[in-house]
Amino acid sequence: MPNPQEALKYIELATSNSGVAYVEGDTVHITVPPERLVDVADTVFNKYNCSFRVCAGVDERPLNGHFSIVHLFTDDRAGYYVVVKAYLSGENPVAPSITSVVPAADWCEMEARDLVGIEFTGRDVYRLVLPPWWPSNLHPLRKEVPYNYRPQPRIESEKLGYSSEYGVIPLGPYHPALHEPEYFELYVDGERVVDVKYRGFHVHRGIEKLAESRMNYQQINFLAERICGICGFVHSTCYALAVEKAAKLEVPERAQFIRSIVLEVERLHSHLLLLGVAFHLLGYDAGFMHVWRIRERIMQLAELLTGSRKTYGINLVGGVRRDINEDKKQKALEVLRELNREFESFIEVAISVPQVKKRLTGTGILPREEAIRLSVEGPVARASGINKDARRDLPYAAYKYASFKVPVYSEGDNLARVLVRVDEVFESISIVEQLLDKLPGGPILLTDFEIPEGAVGVQVVEAPRGGDIHYVVTGRGTLYRWRVRAPTYANIPALRVMLRNQPLADAPITIASIDPCFSCTDRIIVIRNGVAEVFKFPPMVK
Amino acid sequence: MSVKNSFLKKSIWVFHLNTGSCNACDIEILDALTPFHDAERFGVKLVVSPRHADVILLTGPVTAESLPKVVNAIEAAPRPRIIIALGSCGCGGGIWHDTYSTIGGVDKLLEILREKGIVVDAVYYVPGCPIRPEALLYAVALVKGIVPKKREMKVYKAE
Amino acid sequence: MSLKPLKLVIIASSKGRVTVKYPYQEPIVTQEFRGEIDIDPVKCIGCGACVKACPPNALEISESEREIILKYFVGRCIFCWRCIDVCPVNAIKGTRNFELATDKSTDLYTVVVHTRATCEICGKPVETTRMRRYVTEKTPVTEEYITICPECRRRLLAEAVSMRKVGPSERKE
């Protein structure tokens, strides 16, 4: 538990801005009037050096007749979650934008505008999440809109934009360089790209609204797991931990150990996947095939421990569904020993290959000050010298029983990001071995409990790509509001800095080195030909 | 159609069409090309343009945003058009089959294509969440006619 | 130029061939794998607990005048096995079957048809005959209550209460 003395400064901040504050466990809740929101955000982000995570708009009209906007920060040094909330009018909700002091809040405010209908003052606005033909007065996350109301979709694709001076080139959404559907329209002048129009959110499936309607608490675990196919167990664990924190449930220790073990197995498979894809983009296909051959044993281990190669489906609110007996433990240790040996001998060869080493060194540099300003997450932050890891700063599940190092490099180039992930593979193997050794006895599932109404829970879990945050407000029989923010959301604005003044040929590997996961977020940035400078329209981060 | 059967006995070139899935089925498609499962034994190759494709691998519930682009991509594939719908999202719309932002799987997509006059010659369904790479190889072998079909409709009367 | 990259040849040749030649060889499937489910039509009582627990609505119940039909659509199943967790009579079993590809979507359905019992008094159809038998065995409720529908039960209770002879002078303050 964090030190209660550290929470005093937040309580003083709230009272001096005519608001209220209270502390519950490791979360500080601050409620201020909307006019003071920008000053409070400025103090929390710039003066107290918290990381900004996400903001969420909530329709609370059935409860108290207001809308509200919630900004989530984490104090990594002290180990506190800081929730800053403001109530807005129920008829015409207007909130001041905090992007002037917290640049990373750009996209989440536009998402609140599209889905809940909150207007923002003091910034440029644009449509982000919903398709352009969506009726502008239909906000899906408002409580009176049913979750399955579908306006007539448009089947004709739009005409290409027209320009009299520049050529227009459409890129995507189905293009050999892209794994997921994203669309760019490039306006070119000869070889130089002068303008870009971007359309994303092809993967928006309406998950947050679905969880508030026909699902109960236990079914949402399976829904959360399918937000992303590569880091799904992270979302499912984070949701379960957030609801258990809100309802104050005592989950058995053995279940927390099993959750941590499976989280680390997922981290292994994800890092090996990225290394294979990175080698493929660099042209070293032999490396791609060998890394995925090594990775196959981890998929079989995951199937042995949980029942499925991916989307494990063992999490429930209150514990887990599958146990690890002695036989599985021995098999797991054997697989990890073999993996350690094979990966060590292989990665030594792979990093020394000339095309790999020379193309990764010195490209895509992200300086430390920019990384702090943009609140980047995960290996991208650790490769630029920021010592940030939610497993150590805000401990959850069974991580306090394992000792591990957090690898930090200071160069900030592509090679540093790859080496951070290679080091994390070896650390993960060691964490799993330690936890398997210390596994306590006891039950694995809590069956007799009740979840109260109106409780708030916030939880951060360190995914392979960075910190993933879930914010839940419980309701009657199901959730009242659920906000998910995946780590790639925060990492993509950093691409603008990384691709500045770089040759075009290094762009694909730079983009792949932040390990983008578009089904978690669905945002991307565009490259420009010629003297490459990342250019995005509408403007992303000023 | 005998033309379809005769040319499908040779190598099948597939085009991967992601209509908004969570990516688990997509990385299992890539996994089918790696040394353990080796789809290239059957001559399967991933191509970059739908114009070169024999078979389209469709993953994801068709989302409202990606619908016009999916229709364009399928229209670009030459006849005979064969679609393999992968996973719970492709076959039946998935866990989000009735939300505001999805169309609901390959069956609703086929209705829309029929209205526009685009003919799809055969559709194969592969259930799974995510599909195993072996299930994808089984589907490719079924398209080529090497293995027999195993799943059939079962109706029981309880009394 | 260093010769270290050539070590890859040594690694590759020491591994040899790792391909499992499915479908001509058995695939590597562990004992824990979650495949298709198998509904036993003899044990199923048509209660609908699995329908309530299924996240993607792959199990559905439809009612008609004489029958209650349980439909299982493998196409939308996510293989989570929650239905197996909640079934009160253990009528659902899990298998390791994943070879489910087909070219007709009707092949992917499993249907169990139950007959409906009727209310003794008004004749309206209520739950399945098997569920009525199950509830009678499990709970100490008298036979005459279990064979009438909720509306008739309410009407009979109101009639019984209205026939109690308590006048205004005997009512307690």
Image (cartoon, rainbow, N blue to C red):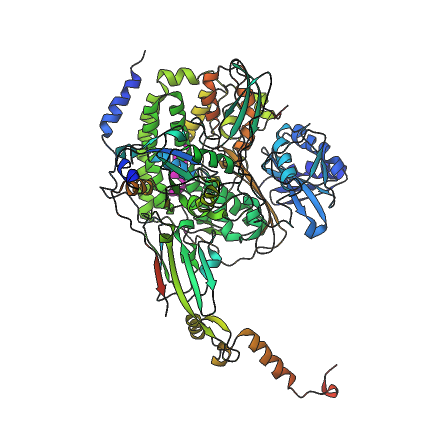
**A358 horizontally vs A249: left or right:** left
The N terminus of chain A: image quadrant? top right
Q: Position of residue A49 (x, y in %)?
A: 63, 29
Residue lying furthest front in this view?
A: B117
**B1 horizontally vs A367: left or right:** left
Quarter of the image for residue B90 reads: top left
The C terminus of chain A: image quadrant? top right
Count of residue discs = 0
In the foreground, C148 or A396: C148
Please tell me whether residue A438 belongs to the stretch shown in magenta.
yes
Residue at position x 32%, y 52% in the image: B151
Q: Is residue A311 above or below residue A524?
A: below
In the foreground, A165 or A127: A165
Tell me where the magenta segment starts and ends, as one range: A425-442
Main SS of residues in magenta: helix
Q: Position of residue A521 (x, y in %)?
A: 53, 35
Residue A526 in view (yes/no): yes
Q: Position of residue C27 (x, y in %)?
A: 27, 43
Quarter of the image for residue A404 reads: top left
Residue at position x 42%, y 27% in the image: A176
In the foreground, B158 or A243: B158
Please tell me whether residue B53 belongs to the stretch shown in magenta.
no
Quarter of the image for residue A258 reads: top left
Q: Position of residue A291 (x, y in %)?
A: 34, 29
Residue A525 in view (yes/no): no
**B103 horizontally vs B26: left or right:** right
